Amino acid sequence: MTRQTVLGANGTIGCVLATELRKYTDQVRLVSRNPRKSHESDELFPLDLSLPGQVEKAVEGSSVVYLVVGFEYKLRVWQDVWPRLMRETLDACAKHDAKLVFFDNVYMYGRSSLSRMTEDSPLDPPSRKGAVRLRIARMLLDDCRSGKVQGLIARSADFYGPGNERSFLTELVYKNLRKGSKARWLADADKLHSFTYTPDAARATALLGNAEDAYGQVWHLPTDPHSLTGRQLAALFASEMGAQDRLSILPTWLIRGLGVFMPFMRELSEMMYQYDRDYVFDSTKFDQRYPFQKTTYAQGVKATVASR
């Protein structure tokens, strides 16, 4: 068996991915500031990936590297850290002959593509964070085309699932319903909005990393094709929790206004275009290539609530 390494092992995806990789190898290296074992034989590799010059030590001796880091949701941090980390990771993978799997989001797609996002959707990011994501995705694909590395992009919609504290659905819907308040939504609750279930995303990412024919490509991770509106998703949570189905809408103008005083709202403001129109994530390419049982929204919400 060959070593497979998770960069960002303590994150939402990294934790589940570490477990999934056991299906493919008995040598798993977990890299983060404070890595935790998911299996007794896991190799813990404490490292601050936000600091320069650290990545090569983690990559050495690996056959496949999974870059699933989630940095602080600040534009300045993304602009400073992401391009450097991607460059260092690509160079380290090239030096040590390791394949690279990059877990990505959809920020680089243009506004007009959101109603049906596929791997071929135009790359025209309307936000500064999206420009960062486009830049680092191109770095990887350019190195793949030149033959410098073997790599792939595993792309996810917004995600939700057990143990996912950063999920939009957890923060604005579940937590508010749990304390007896109204669930909250952004901009327009009657628009469709896809969410990828985190256990599905991790399982599919491990599958892609161990599929020889997956490299050199972008893959949308398997997501329930029956997208629901924000109102329908909030109702699913309310029903599962035995809570009153009540919903309040935070309009775009309010988010922008709060951004003057609240740093997180300022960061969120430029992403509001993802909530004022349909946001539908299409994983047909993956579905047609690999056998995979996707989790439905009803199943995912039930499991998310039961885990808490």
Image (spheres, rainbow, N blue to C red):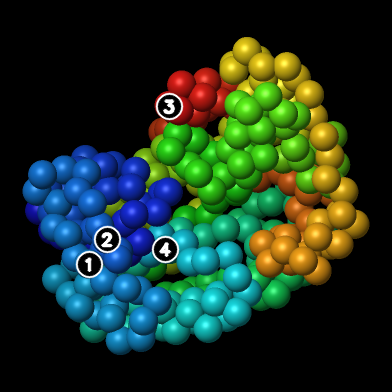
Q: Nearer the viewer, residue 5 or 171?
A: 171
Nearer-N-terminus badge (3/2): 2
* Residue denoted by label 1: 46
What residue sits 78% from the left and 24% below the top? 246
Q: Earlier in the sequence, mark 4 or mark 3?
A: 4
**Percent x, y of residue 128:** 70, 75
Q: Which mark is residue 78?
A: none
Q: Nearer the viewer, residue 261 or 239?
A: 261
**Distance (Cα) linking label 1 and label 2:** 6 Å
The type of residue carrying mark 2 is: Asn
Callouts 1 and 2 close, C-beta under 8 Å: yes
Left or right, 209 with respect to 121, comes to: left
In the depicted structure, whether residue 16 falls above or below residue 94: above
Distance Cα–Cα, label 3 vs label 2: 23 Å
Residue picked out by circle 3: 307
Q: Which quadrant: the C terminus?
A: top left
Mark 1 / mark 3, whichever is N-terminal: 1
Element marked by disc 3: loop
The residue at which mark 4 appears reads as 69
In primary-sequence order, the first of circles 1 and 2 is: 2
Residue 108 coordinates in the image, percent (x, y): 66, 66
In-front residue for pair 306/180 = 180
Question: Few, some or many C-alpha atoms within 10 Å of disc 3 (few <14, some 14-19, many ≥20)?
Answer: few
